[in-house]
Amino acid sequence: MDHFLQSPPWGALQRDLGRTVHERSGPGWRFLAIEERNPAGTLLYAPYGPTATSLAAFDAALAALTDLARSCGAVFVRIEPVDAGLPEADPAALLRTRGLRPAPANQQPELTWVVDVDRDFKEVLAEMKPVNRNLYRNIHKKGVTFRSSQDPAEIPVLLRFLHLTAARNGFKPQSDDYLTQVARSLMPAGAATLFIAELDGEPIAAALTYDSADTRTYAHAALDDTHRKLSAGIPLLVTLMADARDKGLQQVDLWGVAPADQPDHKWAGFTAFKKSFGGREVAYPGTWDLPVRKLRYRGYQLARTGAQAVRRGVGAARTLPARVRGALRR
């Protein structure tokens, strides 16, 4: 899967947001890495990267990332090797042998749900739940139409629905400023598209997608609760899938899903929604750190452990700060 988080348009967006971005490539490998800051200091983060065609190419990419980290004073490199030539069987063991260790938390989803669209679209529809198929085929009878836009001036349509959904469900969406910049940077480049469902010419639902060379990613979506009974979000998603197929893309990535054995997971509800469109689960190795300034990285780990212990009310945490401060100064 050619992930948009490793694409040149994504790098351009990060630069437009004021971030320092590094892009490197060599025989069989490439990466896009963003400079970030956390309590340890500077780190290099390659979201869903590096990309490599073989294990040897992955090692070369890792060496280039390490050299780059040293040159810009980064304490560690953070990677998510989703398409890096790693063996399917136990990639974690291989990553550990290269000095990598699991990050404190995954920054991007470790599980996602993908629908293959590079085939007759009747086959795609056949794998969906009947209600999804029927809505897609018949919702026009209720006056609902669908259109797409790559005009950044239309992003407020989605923002309004996101605010309504956030107020209703009690979550915090990404900021208007961020999504407005996403639209300004990616839409004119053809890397982002806004899909809009309308009832008698008035928007009632919207979805923002990102495209890479072979994959469309379903990134942000929301609807007007006033027209919830129309379930316009379902045929809207099918519409953007059909559009992806017409554009020659191979798959639609519905983004993160909850593990099947965790029915109480906070993502369980929209996981069921995504799985109702057919498709398959894709598991990634997760987020991994490669320490470059090892003593300082160790201090970062101790500081996190101490903070967690304090939050749990563990009295032994009081012994940590002195040596943590000493390690962080080195």
Image: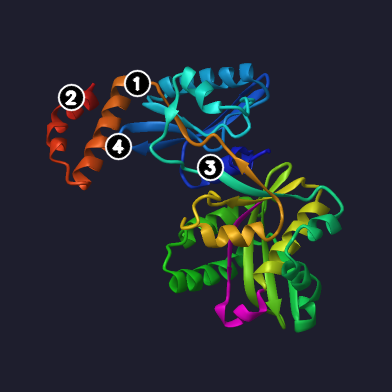
Residue corresponding to mark 3 = 110
**The label number, if any, that marks residue 39 in the structure image:** 4
Q: Earlier in the sequence, mark 2 or mark 1?
A: 1
Q: Earlier in the sequence, mark 4 or mark 2?
A: 4
Amino acid carrying label 3: it is Glu
Q: Amino acid at mark 4?
A: Pro
Q: Nearer the viewer, residue 192 or 62?
A: 62
Range covered by the magenta-colored residues: 217-231
Q: Position of residue 81 (x, y in %)?
A: 56, 31
Using the numbered discs, state the Cα–Cα distance from disc 4 to disc 1 in whole angstroms.
Answer: 14 Å
> What SS does tag 3 mark?
loop
The residue under label 1 is: 293
Sequence order check, earlier mark of 1 and 3: 3
As drawn, the residue found furthest toward the front would be: 261
- The Cα atoms of the two marked residues, 4 and 2, are separated by 14 Å
79 lies above or below 275:
above
Q: Nearer the viewer, mark 3 or mark 2?
A: 3
Asked whether 312 falls inside the magenta stretch, the response is no
Give the camera-side residue of 52 and 188: 52
Whole-number angstrom distance, CA of label 4 to CA of label 3:
24 Å
Residue indicated by mark 2: 326
Answer few, some or many: residues within 10 Å of disc 1's Cα (few below 14, many 20 plus, some between 14 and 19).
some
**Measuring 79% from the left and 78% from the top, which residue is drawn there?**
140
Q: Amino acid at mark 1?
A: Arg
Disc 2 residue type (three-letter): Gly
